[in-house]
Amino acid sequence: MASVVRDWRLQLREALPEFFATGRGSRRSGPVLPDCGEGWCCVVDRLCVRIAAALEEGESFRFESIGQRDGALRVRWAGRLSAASEAAVRSAVDLAEARSMCVCELCGARGQLYRADGVLATRCPAHAEGTPARSPAMTNVHLIHVTVKGRLRVIVGARYHFDSDSFVEIDDVASLRAEA
Ligand SMILES: [Zn+2]
């Protein structure tokens, strides 16, 4: 199991070494590796493909960290990008983080966020422990970055749709929270 996990991470880093290179001035001693379970390899792969597609000639991108936190994929990154490319990268990261909360981190099957002894994890029914951490009304609701006219970024509430791998904006997130 451990060797399989190691494989997909190393393969990804071999394919995109600049994405996983150690940053200048970073306190990290070695290159970055995805710090999450094998079940999310497709989520991370798709994220990397989207970022690579967003980059224009001469632009740079690298992960500062990418891994599981509170049951979701969390990404910190740095790079030199145009406003349009940065917007595309932020959108790709938002989608990956939302998708990770629909996919079992252990096996890649459809899942949801569970809480067990105060620990959050996204799991399929077979791997689940504890109880669902989000009410049905708040499941797949996220705050995402939206670009207006190519530059201005605002944060809006949106619901993630797994099948289309896209967000639909929610007009009134506060009312959802009230319902939940
Ligand atoms: Zn599973």
Image: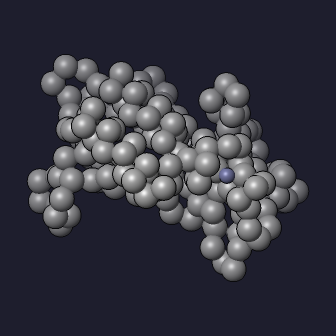
> Is 165 rendered above or below residue 34?
above
Q: Do we see residue 17 in this rendering?
A: yes
- Residue at horizontal 52%, vertical 39%? 43
Q: Quarter of the image containing the C terminus?
A: bottom right
- Taking the image as shown, residue 81 lies to the left or right of residue 76, namely left
Q: Position of residue 90 (x, y in %)?
A: 43, 38
- Taking the image as shown, residue 157 lies to the left or right of residue 125, namely left
> Is 21 rendered above or below residue 68?
above
- Taking the image as shown, residue 94 lies to the left or right of residue 170, namely left
Q: Position of residue 88 (x, y in %)?
A: 41, 29
Q: Do we see residue 174 in this rendering?
A: no
Image coloring type: one colour
Q: Position of residue 6 (x, y in %)?
A: 37, 51
- Taking the image as shown, residue 53 lies to the left or right of residue 81, namely right
- Residue 27, quarter of picture: bottom left
- Residue at horizontal 17%, vertical 52%? 23
- Residue 99, quarter of picture: top right
- Residue at horizontal 44%, vertical 35%? 45
Question: Which residue is outermost to the bottom?
Answer: 117
